[in-house]
Image (cartoon, rainbow, N blue to C red):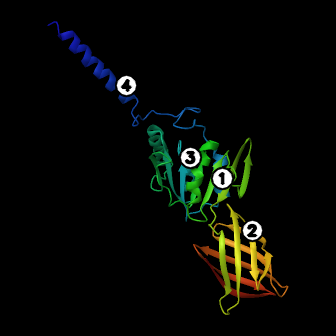
């Protein structure tokens, strides 16, 4: 009999622990996130519905897009992308309770068939299928993600609430009340020496491109004569520039980049010639 009480205490303690675990379970239907609650790397501050809409509009989200929200919180961005813009949307959220809460919100919004919120670490999960990535992280986390984002398919749009990407200048920016958001379009890697030629002739020039993120410059060498690129622009995999030919005629080039190949047109005196370029 003298061992009965200690056994009962252990049993009671075990039952109590089980009860506490149940109360803290991610399946808790009464879970409600609290503004300012701490997470793995950030605190949770929700993005206003108005700014969410403006962010997705800035990224030109459509029904053809796959949107990934990194640090999905209550799921508002993924849900809005699906419900208002017709996109397929995913969220990655570290807090398992928050992830289940966000999926519950997606069901309540009637878009559970188009929205999937999963628990995971944004630095470990894959999201390379995304055509649009949204995030609301701290500056050092944006910089930590930046190399991964720059390796995504050219043309992928990145939208960040509040914080930028350091030296990678934004392509667009909006402000709403006291908040702001930034847009980047992942650029193709175009730096290097290219041989550019007219498709229907043997005329060739050497194209030397220098690149810093989406900012590009460089020169054209034709018949030993080197001239600078003028008005060079890069957006995603679309490149455009002008140069003065050896005949003192201004030429305009627009092309699409695909790895080490370019294809496009050269405009000269109102006419257009197909061109192609290969990187050495």
2 vs 1, front mark? 2
Tell me the tag on residue 76: 3
Query: Which x, y percent locates residue 32?
Result: 50, 34
| Residue that sits furthest to the top in the current view | 2
4 or 1: tag closer to the N-terminus:
4
Q: CA–CA distance between discs 2 and 1?
A: 30 Å
Q: CA–CA distance between discs 4 and 3?
A: 29 Å
Q: Is residue 47 visible?
A: no
3 vs 1, front mark? 1
| Residue that sits furthest to the bottom in the current view | 201
Q: Quadrant of residue 192?
A: bottom right
Q: Quadrant of the N terminus?
A: top left
Q: Which residue is at a point 44% across and 42% down the rendered structure image?
A: 100
2 or 4: tag closer to the N-terminus:
4
Query: Which x, y percent locates residue 78?
Result: 54, 51
* Residue at which label 4 appears: 20
* Residue at which label 1 appears: 55
Check the image and report above or below for 124 versus 230: above
Q: CA–CA distance between discs 3 and 1?
A: 12 Å
Q: CA–CA distance between discs 4 and 1?
A: 40 Å
* Residue at which label 2 appears: 217
| Residue that sits furthest to the left in the current view | 1
Q: Quadrant of the C terminus?
A: bottom right
3 or 1: tag closer to the N-terminus:
1
């Amino acid at each position: 009999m003298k061992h009965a009480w200690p056994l009962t205490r252990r049993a009671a303690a075990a039952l109590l622990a089980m009860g506490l675990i149940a109360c803290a379970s991610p399946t808790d239907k009464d879970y409600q996130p609290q503004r300012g609650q701490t997470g793995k790397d950030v605190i949770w501050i929700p993005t206003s519905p108005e700014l969410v809409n403006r962010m997705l509009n800035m990224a030109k989200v459509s029904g053809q897009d796959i949107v990934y929200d990194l640090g999905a919180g209550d799921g508002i961005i993924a849900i809005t992308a699906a419900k208002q813009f017709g996109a397929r949307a995913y969220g990655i959220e570290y807090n398992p309770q928050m992830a289940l809460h966000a999926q519950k919100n997606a069901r309540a919004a009637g878009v559970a068939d188009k929205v999937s919120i999963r628990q995971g670490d944004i630095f470990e999960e894959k999201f390379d299928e995304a055509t649009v990535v949204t995030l609301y992280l701290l500056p050092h986390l944006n910089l930590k993600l930046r190399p991964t984002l720059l390796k995504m398919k050219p043309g992928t749009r990145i939208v960040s609430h509040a914080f930028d990407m350091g030296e990678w200048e934004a392509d667009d920016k909006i402000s709403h009340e006291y908040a702001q958001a930034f847009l980047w379009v992942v650029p193709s890697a175009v730096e290097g020496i290219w041989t550019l030629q007219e498709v229907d002739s043997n005329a060739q020039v050497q194209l030397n491109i220098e690149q810093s993120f989406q900012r590009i410059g460089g020169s054209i060498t034709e018949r030993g004569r080197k001239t600078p690129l003028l008005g060079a622009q890069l957006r995603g995999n679309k490149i455009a520039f002008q140069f003065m030919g050896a005949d003192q005629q201004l030429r305009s080039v627009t092309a699409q980049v695909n790895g080490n190949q370019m294809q496009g047109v050269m405009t000269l005196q109102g006419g257009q010639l197909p061109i192609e370029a290969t990187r050495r």
